[in-house]
Image (cartoon, rainbow, N blue to C red):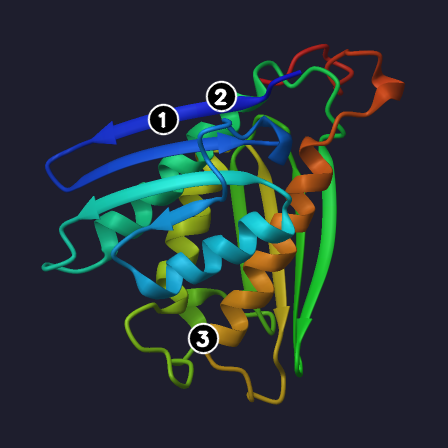
Amino acid sequence: MSRIATVIRNSNETEIKLFLALEEENRPPTRTKALIQTPIPLLNHMLELFTFHGFLDMELIVKGDTHIDIHHTNEDIGIVLGQAFDKALGNRSGITRFGSAFAPMESTLGHSVVDISGRGHLRLLLDGKTAGEMPPISNQGEYTFIYLEHFLDSLAKKLGANIIINIQNQDGSGDMHTIAETVFKSLGMALKQAVAMDPRRGGKVPSTKGIID
């Protein structure tokens, strides 16, 4: 079964084209590897990690009004990525639906839990605190924890997934790069579990309601 999607989104703020295949073997023969090109360097790296550890294939080309700031571009990439997953999954028949994964990096630990339930919701916590409750993270630079929250919230809502991510960094040693890396790695692995086909479902939608919408 070929579970692929192409999404194009053009606005006055961004131009985005995304190809996504939920299995690497569905890569078109004219392409040899995943390609991520956005004007946000840290997000480029994080999406490469997400794709690699999620065993996905993705080609993402983005132009955005980053001369103003990265808000529109960051959020719109999350929107398009969620739309691509939604399109590739179709009516969700036969999928596992749930996924959970941990990813450590030095003393920082990210844990992502996913339920592709049709109800888009995000909870992102660092040592029990939301983005609005936290002081700035060391070496935060351009890509802040609030930008990470905006990206993930857009992804969760457009995919229709309940995503809960808890990060432990209680000694304060992790910088934004380290923290984001544990998030994108664990989320990639959790989503891979959730979108995987479960033969025990017999091709049916994994819900007692019979639909996921």
Give the residue at x 58% y 40%: 56
Does the CB distance between marks 2 and 1 fall below 8 Å? yes
Tag 2: amino acid: Lys
Q: Compute the Cα span from label 3 to label 1.
A: 29 Å
Where is 147 relative to 20, above or below?
A: below
Q: Nearer the viewer, residue 59 or 203?
A: 59
Residue where numbered disc 1 is placed: 7
Query: Circle 3 is placed at which residue position?
Result: 176
Please report whichever mark, 3 or 1, sits nearer to the chain's N-terminal start: 1
Q: Is residue 10 above or below residue 167?
A: above
Question: x, y percentage for residue 32?
Answer: 49, 40
Q: Residue at x 39, y 59 (%)?
A: 43
Residue 145 in the figure: left or right of residue 51: left
Left or right? Give the position of 47 relative to 63.
right
Determine crowd level at label 1: few under 14, some 14-19, many 20+ residues with C-alpha closer than 10 A.
some
- The numbered mark, 2 or 1, whose residue comes first in the sequence reads 1
- The amino acid sitting under disc 1 is Val
In this picture, is 156 found above or below 25? below
| The quadrant where residue 105 appears | bottom right
Q: Which mark is residue 87?
A: 2
Instruction: Classify mark 2: residues with Cα within 10 Å, few (<14), some (14-19) or many (20+).
Output: some
